[in-house]
Amino acid sequence: MPRIGCLGPAGSFSELAAKKFCAGYDVALFPSFKEAVDEVTSGRAEFAALPIENSLNGGVLRNLDLLEREDVFAVRELVLPIDHRLATRKGVRLEEIRYVYSHEQAIGQCAEYLARCLPKAQCIFTASTAESLEKLDAVSAGIVGAHVRRDGVVLSRENIADNKNNYTRFMLVKRGGAPKDISSRKAFFCAVCEHRPGSLLELLDIFSRYGFNLTRIESRPVKERFGEYRFFIELEADVSDPRARNALGEAELYCRQFKLLGAYD
């Protein structure tokens, strides 16, 4: 059976995304995104599902770094609505809760609810939302997705996130570079410009001259050179279009470092 890797344990939003990406695939759950990607680069899995961006918290930085560093390429994207629920053991009352476990982003996205309803509870980060289910006891709660089902666990009736308009964008990545004859609605690349005034403007002007709309730009430090940055840029473009190939080729020649990270619908 074909295989897709993602962050576990069972019940994580990454697992939900993996199942939506690849219905019928064997879903392999890992304790870290890096291990899920290693499963792809080693050839043991065809794909991995990686969260790349949250509408409230911005880019998932460790996964941007993985896309840049590892031999993988994004071929599809999925925007998943995020619905956070408070999870407790059956019979546990709100006033009895002393600890709240969940992923750092989930706790941050529910900060107002926690301050209002659980002001004395200590928040403790876990590797994923689903992992918080393993911590539940008579004085502990977790924050998990509304899709989670487990015997003896009760979810709050309503979404407890501060902002209900919450989405996470996932990418489906495969081993290697761009497939031959690929077409797309968007292209995603990262680049390091010369460290001088106007260099980023000149890079962006390439795509302006060709008439392409940029939909996202984010920066990450270049780890070996303090004060310099790598830019992650997405544009609306079909990479099978000669204009897009010319624009990307010109950008690659212009930049000190360049990598096409994905092309997808």
Image (cartoon, grey):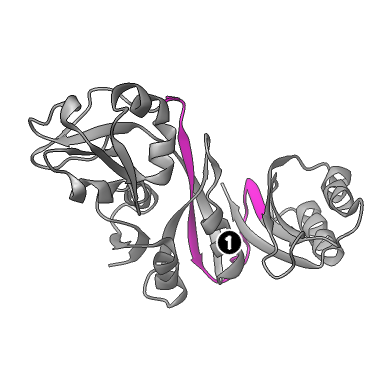
Where is the N terminus found, in terms of image quarters? Answer: bottom left
The residue sitting at 61% across, 55% down in the picture is 263
Percent position of residue 200, x then y: 84, 51
Residue lying farthest to the bottom in this orientation: 42
Q: Is 226 displayed left or right of 208 in the figure?
A: left
The residue sitting at 34% across, 29% down in the picture is 114
Does residue 175 show up magenta in the picture? yes
Secondary structure beneath dot 1 equals helix
Position of 114 relative to 66 (above/below): above
Residue type indicated by callout 1: Asp
Q: Is 76 displayed left or right of 119 in the figure?
A: right
Percent position of residue 242, x then y: 78, 56
Q: Is 247 displayed left or right of 263 in the figure?
A: right
- Name the residue beneath numbered marker 1: 65
Could you say which quadrant of the image residue 39 lies in?
bottom left
Does residue 44 show up magenta in the picture? no
Residue lying farthest to the right in this orientation: 197
Q: Is 35 displayed left or right of 61 in the figure?
A: left
Percent position of residue 49, x then y: 42, 56
Q: Which residues are magenta?
A: 162-188
Q: Nearer the viewer, residue 125 or 260?
A: 125
The residue sitting at 45% across, 25% down in the picture is 163
Bin the neighbour count of mark 1 within 10 Å (Cα to Cα): few under 14, some 14-19, many 20 and up.
some
Q: Nearer the viewer, residue 264 or 161?
A: 161
Q: Nearer the viewer, residue 201 or 223?
A: 223
Position of 51 relative to 221 (above/below): above
